[in-house]
Amino acid sequence: MCGIVGYVGNESALDVILSGLKRLEYRGYDSSGVALVNGNMFIEKRVGKISNLEDHLAGKNLGGFHVGIGHTRWATHGVPSDINAHPHTGCHERIAIVHNGIIENYAAIKKMLIDKGHIFSSETDSEVIAHLIEYYIENNSFLDAVLKALAKLEGTYGILAISESEPDTIIAARKGSPLLLGIADDAMILASDASAIIEYTRKVVYLEDGEIIEVKKDKMKTFDLERRRIDKKVEDITWDISDIEKQGFEHFMLKEIFEQPETIQNAYRGRIVIDEGLVRLDGITLSRQDINDVRRVILIACGTSFHAALVGEYLIEEFARIPVEVEYASEFRYRRPILLRGDLIVVISQSGETADTLAALREARDRGANVVGITNVVGSTIARECNAGGVYLHAGPEIGVASTKAFTSQIVVLYLLGIFLARRKGMTADEAGALLRELTKIPDKVQWILDRADAVKEVAELYKDTANCLYLGRGINFPVALEGALKLKEISYVHAEGYPAAEMKHGPIALIDENMPAVFAAPFWDEVYAKVVHNMQEVKARSGKIICIATEGDQEILKHADHVLRIPNIGKMLSPLLSVIPLQLLSYYVAVLRGCNVDQPRNLAKSVTVE
Ligand code: F6R
């Protein structure tokens, strides 16, 4: 995720900002930049590592600047590049801003400002903030100009702004993206993350959503968005650096599991209009006619992304009634696939760099197919090479090698894609609106499960020494069983297999005895539920132990399962977004209890760029 640092004091602002940005490197970034102000504005920004930025700053005498802002960017709108890096300015370099978050209505604001003569230089959503402040500062103080600009913004932000007109001031505002102010002797340091300031002070003020703060080197004033003064409490930081980087979580994987209420929301934020039953996937560049002509969808991916594709098969077929095939990228590329007119190829890759998926993309594209990408990393090779555009997950960097939050974001995007295609095939606005409304309930329901993570830990304690584990599910929860098994084997090295529950009797049932736990995903009541219960009885009859992911309120399940992990009630099509969460937690806790290196399991790499 992007990082922010700002400094007002007596020291060289550049030195403090660069050291703060380096503290934020662990979050992942693709470019960085600084803006410094006294009577003039100085700006430098570069794609790549902070060391690249430093190389371009070397030899410039900047020690006389005592106020400035800096940023590490993780691209969301526009590829990683010098121009798209922050800080951004208006038409003139008199205002500079850095921004974390997503401005949902930036396209409308940009158009309004272009009509007024503003000239934009980047592809980012963030640049509109600088132009808006520039627009309003003509007739207002710096603070009022920022307040007026904020009133126009929809979406999320953590913003720092500086202006040549008030060179001793930084203005910061927060809505949905963290910001805090560190109070040091004769200096104030603003940052998106406490690790950037802890070297200088442990006294902090945490900004809340809807707050704006005007900071000078020896004073600060906080307001709400109506310009009413707010008193803020100064708090002490009690943790050390390593705690902060993982935000108090023991591992990145756990942090990423717990981020899912937010990352799921980020995947649909700004893309849906519930009342109109509308899904906007503006990154897909296909013409209306091309979309109307889609007769078959082929989803291509590897590993966890492949499991998300399997869920996508159910979603797209159910919503759009278009046939879907799901292919391992590594198989697709070598079997001379038959591609037909009306085929839409969708490649899915968290990293956007997986060699097998990239090769499959090229194979399909070179045969004349339309290829859309679903990736997390903006400007990645897969994102760049898709000839029909794509959809970004906006999940933020995934650092744990085992993919968790990217999986749920991929499912959300596939859910949106299913509705997007279905609207062209006759789904009504009301039907689509109802499906989208259900989707917006998911973040709270995921939080509900996470709040009960201790129950999963207790089960993990009981089964940490198992050598084998079977994962079973049916219908749309069959891919969840595959994903649960993959998670367990990759981080805890326990042998695990995922099967459609009914397949068990065709072979795997031979493995069942008192030492073989079976994990069932059976999260809803319907005809398949009854059949899954029947499969549980088959396990029980052979002394197997049963762990079941079941819906809240389902009492029947207690008769069959040895351990029940609850998820909230949800319709079938969204249930994988909930049923996978306890399975992610289960694999995590088992791995920790077995003493495994959770974030960097043996033999695995985060992005598999070799065949
Ligand atoms: C599993 C995992 C891998 C990846 C696979 C594809 O936790 O992370 O199975 O899902 O290597 O990677 P991407 O999605 O980056 O193409």
Image: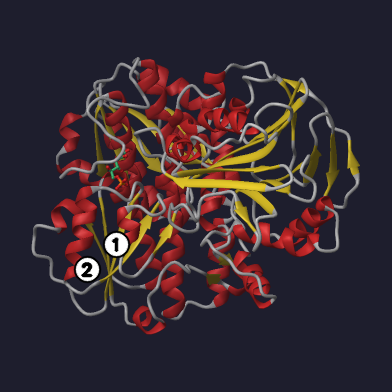
Q: Which residue is mark 2?
A: 365
| Residue type at numbered disc 2 | Arg
| Residue type at numbered disc 1 | Glu
Ligand 1 contact, mark 1 (Cβ < 8 Å): no
Which quarter of the figure has residue 132?
Answer: bottom right
Which quarter of the figure has residue 145?
Answer: bottom right
Looking at the rendering, the quadrant in which ligand 1 lies is: top left
Residue found farthest to the bottom: 289
- Mark on residue 359? none
Residue found at x 49% / y 56%:
83
**Residue 525 appearing in the image:** no
Taking depth in this image into account, of 437 and 468 the one nearest to the observer is: 437
Residue found at x 58% / y 32%:
451
**Do labels 2 and 1 touch, CB within 8 Å?**
yes
Taking depth in this image into account, of 93 and 73 the one nearest to the observer is: 93
Considering only vertical position in the picture, is 384 above or below 409? below
Query: Callout 2: helix, strand or loop?
Result: helix
Q: Position of residue 175 (x, y in %)?
A: 70, 47
Crowding at mark 1 (Cα within 10 Å: few <14, some 14-19, many 20+): some
Crowding at mark 2 (Cα within 10 Å: few <14, some 14-19, many 20+): some
Image depth: mark 2 or mark 1 in front: 1
Quadrant for the C terminus, please.
Answer: top left
Q: Which residue is mark 1?
A: 385
